[in-house]
Each structure stands twice: as structure tokens, then as C-alpha cells.
Amino acid sequence: MPDLADLYPGFASHWIDTSAGRIFARAGGSGPPLMLLHGYAQTNVMWHRVADELAKRFALVIPDLPGYGWSAAPDAGPDHAPYTKRAMAAAMIDVMETLGHARFSLAGHDRGGRVAYRLALDHPGRVTRVAVLDIVPTYAMWRGLDARLACRIWHWTFLSLPAPGPENIIGRDPVAFWDWKTAPGTKAKSLAAFDPRALAHYRAFFSDPLRIHATCEDYRAGRTTDLAHDEADRAAGRKIACPMLALWGESGIPSETESPLDTWREWANDVRGFAIDCGHYLPEENPQATTAALIDFFGGRE
């Protein structure tokens, strides 16, 4: 990758061996541990506008998910692991254990939110509190897919098509695809909300064919194995036990579904949440409101 700006000055960099390959993570701040997980098609730098304030209260760990950013992009198995959210969640536990955190708070945006709620379901003893940003469960998304929502989340069906179809199409001009896919998700329907230095990070990683393939595998997992895991939990009546916060953009994807808060209450015992004035990319479009909501929920110290 080309030289890219350091958006976390003063934070340490870690390369950590995990069950899903080598994971890259930034870490900084002090206080109780809080892990922040990014979404598609972004990297750890998506949290850069909220990290400084959060680092005053929390020991932050901000990794790149498998196949994203500077983390490894292993070959996928028949079930699309290690890009299933269960496998990603296990890798995130490896990261936190290596850094000395057996129990921690967790926040995830987009695909990272799916890893976060899966981790909370699979490993309830690990998570003290969990926040999800601009998602509803994978189960609810696929079950609620209608003509209106299908146009909003067309990439779910496109990226989950068999390889190498999506990879070949994206690979013809990855940057153009990234820009075209991302801009409509913002409230302004443009890339103006993003720091140009962050855009350089996103475009650089997404120009790598191995990572284009890995991110498609993420969505193939979502359509198959992740959905099956959600269906099994639903049938068994399993719920997230720790306190949960759901945030979504007023112009974000969950705003196109039935009440996001009511949906999450079907999946967790203790849920609160509300919409924020922005589109899909809460920490970058409205970092002030996002930071305030996370601090209020997670607590921490000054």
C-alpha cells in the first residue's frame, strides 16, 4: 500500500496472530477496555474522529477485521470462514486476550456491528456492554427484504453472488466502485463527510484483489452461515444478556426497516437506543453525537 497518514498519533500499532490470521490493531488511551469494530468497505481509521475523546476514558483497541485494512486475508473455507461473524468474533477475542483484556466493552459499525452482536451471543462472559451502529440483525434484514429495502441494500445480494463474478466487476475499477457504493449512504449523498486522509486508506486497501475477494466472502458468509447462526439462536430463544445500545442514522439503513429498537428488543434483554442526525456513517458524519452517546452508555473515566 502507499504511504498513508497516521490518523491515530500516539496510539500503538500491533500485529497479533489469531485464529483468523494476523490481525492489525491500533491501541491507545486508558481506562476500562473498549474495542471498536469497523464495517464495509472501511478500516480501523473510520473511528479516527471519535478516538481522541474516547481515549480519555477508555483503553481503546481498534482492529482491522480479517480481510480488511492491514489484517490478513486468508483463504475462505466452504462455510466462508474466517469471514463468518462467528469466526471473526473468535479472532477479536484473540486480539483482546493478547492485549491483556479478558472482559471488555464492544462497539461495532456495519459489518463490525454484526461481529459485535455475534460475539455477545456466543461469548456472553466476555462482553460487559455492547453497542451496534446502524444495523439490525442479519436475520431481520434477510427476512424483511422487500422491493424498497432491496434497492437500498443491493450490495448484499450482489456481493454474495458466487466468485469470481462480483470480484471481476469490482476489480475493473475498485476506487470508482467504492465511491459509487459509499456516497449514497451518507445524509448528503456525497463523500464530503469523509476526511480525505481516511478516504486514501479505504481506497488503498480496497484496490487489492485479495481484499476485494475477502470482503465479498464476508457477504457470502452473511447470506449463508451467519444467517444460519442467527436462525439457530432465534429458534433456541437465545438473547444478548449484557446491556445493549443501538444507534442508527436518521438517513441510515435501519431507518428503512421497521422500528430498529423494537427489532433489537427481540434479540437482547436490556436495550436502549435512538437515531442520530446523519446517514450510515455515524462516527464520521456526526462524531460529536456519536461520541456523546458512546460515553454515556459505556461510562469510563476522564
Image (cartoon, grey):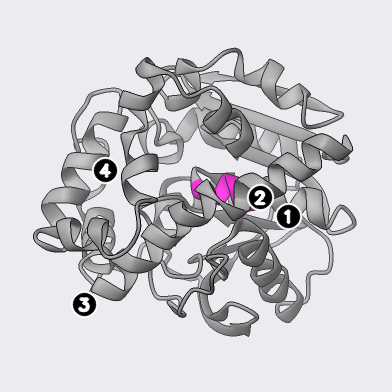
Where is residue 89 drawn, in percent x and y? 67, 62
Describe residue 3's horizontal placement relative to residue 34 as left or right.
Answer: left
Decide if residue 251 is in sight here. Answer: no
User: What residue is disc 1 on?
Assistant: 119
The residue at the point 70 percent across, 68 percent down is 90
- Marks 3 and 1 close (CB-CB < 8 Å): no
Task: Indicate the amino acid at tag 1.
Answer: Leu
Can residue 17 be found in the magenta stretch?
Answer: no
Residue highlighted by disc 2:
116
> Which residue is at a point 43% across and 77% down the rendered structure image?
73
Secondary structure under the numbered disc 2 in the rendered image: helix
Question: 278 and 299: which one is in front?
Answer: 278
Viewer-nearest of discs 3 and 2: 2
Say if mark 1 contacts mark 2, CB within 8 Å: yes
Apparent side of residue 37 relative to residue 297 in the rendered image (left or right): left
Residue identifier under label 3: 3
Q: Which residue is mark 4?
A: 194
Tell me the amino acid under the disc marked 3: Asp
Pair 4/1: label in front: 1
Q: Circles 3 and 4: CB distance less than 8 Å? A: no
Gap between marks 4 and 2 measured at Cα: 24 Å
Which residue lies at the image location 52% right of the left edge and 65% below the top edge? 80
Q: Earlier in the sequence, mark 3 or mark 2?
A: 3
